[in-house]
Image (cartoon, coloured by chain):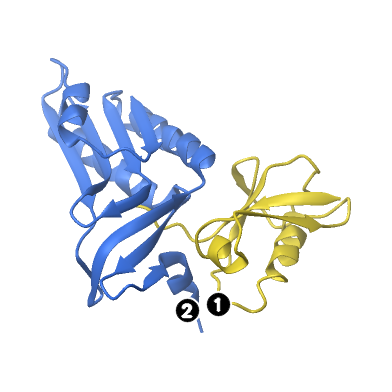
Chain colours: A yellow, B blue
Amino acid sequence: MTIRVLLFASWAEVLGSRAVDVEVSPDATAAEVLAAVESRARGAALARPAVAVNQRIVAAGTRVRERDEVALIPPVAGG
Amino acid sequence: MRTVVDRAAIDAATLLEEVARSGNGATVLFTGSVRDLNEGRAVTGIDYDAYEAMAGEELQRIVAEVAARYETTDIVAVHRIGYVPVGALSVAVAVAHPRRAGAFDAARSVIEAIKRRLPIWKCEHYANGEHAWQDARVAGARP
């Protein structure tokens, strides 16, 4: 299945886009989606992000479904 | 209670007016602004990126949690996103409470949770034209 992954901050800058589509197996987890995006970063020194599904941070083993809103959440730095 | 995550300049005085109520004996206003120097580098401004939908929801959750814990609904929290020049406010929290301890503690709780939980990221812009994402610096610091 195809998952659209929203990107922010340094991830968006390194990948040159605010979102990428990745192809993963139908039973893919959040960790597998992250790995699919990481493979496109070609070893850039990026902080390891959390994964948000439908605007909530999820555990690595959480299953992702096709219409979920998925986003990579680097270490936050607001304020 | 009111929360805002958007690009508009922050007017701290209006936050104070919003939380004012005759039952409140104490009001605390916290503001965060962009400073001109960070770790020895001259900063001209900060670009704040945000996962806007999630940040808006999370800020509402933060304020609701603090309101419940400290028993006051007179809380306003605003985070500006986009480019914020040196000297301008990037964040403001106003809390009014019957007592000063409650006002201080609730305001502190809101800003600390903002720093820890809101999906917002800083990109510092420097006087020499360079820029650096602060989330990337975290990665660079790791072994």
Query: What residue sits 25% from the left and 67% below the top?
Result: B43
Q: Which residue is mark 2?
A: B140
Q: In which quarter of the view is residue A32 placed? A: bottom right
> Dot 2 falls on which chain?
B
Badge 2 marks a residue whose secondary structure is: helix
Q: Check the image and name the residue furthest to the front.
A: B129
- Residue B24 pos. (x, y %): 15, 22
User: The residue marked by circle 1 belongs to what chain?
Assistant: A
Q: Position of residue B55 (x, y in %)?
A: 47, 41
Q: Whole-Å distance between the Cαs marked 1 and 2?
A: 6 Å
Q: Residue at x 11, y 24 (%)?
A: B25
Seen as rendered, the residue at the extreme top is B22
Residue B69 point in image, percent of width and height? 35, 32
Q: Amino acid at mark 2?
A: Gly
- For residue B37, side relative to residue B48 (left or right): left
Residue A73 image label:
none
**Which mark, residue A45?**
1
The x, y position of residue B123, in whole percent, is 39, 62
Q: Are marks 1 and 2 on the same chain?
A: no
Q: Are marks 1 and 2 in contact (CB under 8 Å)?
A: yes
Badge 1 density bin: few <14, some 14–19, many ≥20, Cα 10 Å: some
Residue at 20% x, 35% y: name it. Answer: B11
Say what secondary structure mark 1 lies in: loop
Q: Quadrant of residue A68?
A: top right
Disc 1 residue type (three-letter):
Ala
Residue B4: image quadrant is top left
| Left or right for B109, reference A29 | left
From this viewpoint, which residue is outermost toward the bottom?
B143
Disc 2 residue crowd, few under 14, some 14–19, many 20+, Cα 10 Å:
few
The correct choice, above or below, for A15 with respect to A25 in the image is below
Residue B132, compared with residue A67, is above or below; it is below
In this view, the residue in front, B8 or B62, is: B8
